[in-house]
Amino acid sequence: MEIRKVPVINKRDAIAWLQKNLFSTWYNTILTVVSLGFIYWIGKGFIQWAITEAQWEVIESNFRLFFVGFYPIKPNNLLWRPWLTLGIIMSMGGLSWGILSHPKTNLFNTKNLVFFSIIALIFSLISIPSNISSSIILLSFFLLLIIGAILGKKIGKEIPNLIRWLPLLWIGIFFINLWILLGTKYVRLDNLSGLILNILVAVVSISLCFPLGVLLALGRQSKLPVIRWLSIAYIEIIRALPLIGIIFMAQVMLPLVLPATFRPDRVIRVIAAFTIFSSAYLAENVRGGLQAVPQGQVEAAKALGLNPFYTLGFIVLPQAIRAVIPSIVGQFISLFKDTSLLAIVGLVDLLGIAEKIVKGNQKFVGDYQEAYIFIALIFWLICYSMSLVSRKLESKSNS
């Protein structure tokens, strides 16, 4: 039996790493010093402004509005509904995190602990001055995330194939949360505002544009001329139009082609616009993945006697989608960021709430920087979480 020697990895210390990566040549040294000076100058000015000049009361006093907008409180204090949906999402997010993590990976390494500690501290400092109960609830949700991650890792070890059912579980959770939010006569779809409106539009649009984009990608490679040219026409025309133009057309023109007795809510029309727009770009991403699958895979499937449907569903599509996971998630992240355009068509999303606060309340007039920094932090947290999930999926699919 041959014994293979494990290669010894030479670990460089911090000084050697800095010398190799930042001070290897004279021009790299100059760039490093200039960059550090610029970062110090910007960071010092921002920290000084944030501590001594910024009026963070605009966040403290309107914490609820940023997240749930004008969701009705009366009667019977309906705010328990959005709180419950957030708790379900955090629990399911922790469960998914644990299931997707590698069995030998430490969930609570130094990097993760520092990240979650900073986030918990930020939200605690923001919500404590105005409402201690909100701070306690938010910290409880972080605890739910941690407990869900621990349980998810244990369940993932016991049931490795559970990862395949995660999308269906998330779809079920979505409909449950939608029923919790809208399952009362006091709340309509157009009454949703704030962050929950951004999340709703993004989640529904992502869920609809993904299968539509896959169908368009397959249609563009179809051997039937009618299907191929219709798919090409749709993709090229939609990609040549700006998103804001499609949103305005959905708001104004969609009711004209529908029966007079059927007038969908504005949120439904916006979701249709986002789905139409994103599916065209997603189709090109999927088409790139389809072209990356070797033709020998298809020929091998035919040799085994698989029909075209099974060949496509079990051989071609899984490999194609696995190859373009980063670009697909990038499109999803772009879609979520584009939900900030909802304020342009009269829907009060997270950005619209900020504008109403800093313009409609005399007490907070001019506090644009504080509100926009808070909004940027929320968008970054959500987009970074999506990026982390995509990396987990990519590493899981390649293992």
Image (spheres, helix red, strand yellow):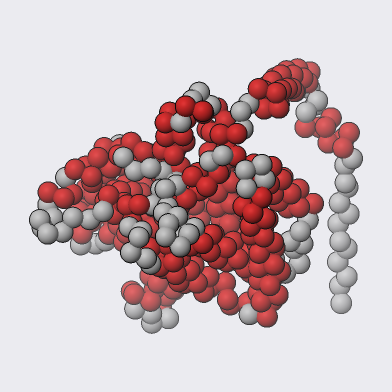
As drawn, the residue found furthest toward the front would be 75
Residue 189 in view of the camera? yes
Residue 122 in view of the camera? no
Check the image and report above or below for 126 versus 355.
Answer: below
Q: Between 68 and 207, which is closer to the camera in this rendering?
A: 68
Q: State the image quarter where residue 5 is shown.
A: bottom right
Check the image and report above or below for 304 versus 31.
Answer: below
Residue at 36% over, 58% down: 187
Where is residue 35? Give x, y as percent.
71, 22
Q: Between 179 and 268, which is closer to the camera in this rendering?
A: 179
Check the image and report above or below for 328 versus 31.
Answer: below
Q: Between 200 and 85, which is closer to the camera in this rendering?
A: 85
For residue 237, side relative to residue 59 (left or right): left
Residue at 88% over, 47% down: 10
Report the label total.
Answer: 0
For residue 335, side relative to residue 139 (left or right): left
Residue at 78% over, 56% down: 109
Where is residue 160? Give x, y as percent.
63, 77
Where is residue 262? Give x, y as percent.
15, 59
Which quarter shows the C terminus?
A: bottom right
Q: Between 225 and 324, which is closer to the camera in this rendering?
A: 324
Residue at 41% over, 54% down: 72
Which quarter shows the N terminus?
A: bottom right
Q: State the image quarter where residue 162 is shown.
A: bottom right
Check the image and report above or below for 311 versus 253.
Answer: below
Where is residue 108? Give x, y as percent.
76, 58
For residue 56, side relative to residue 6 (left or right): left
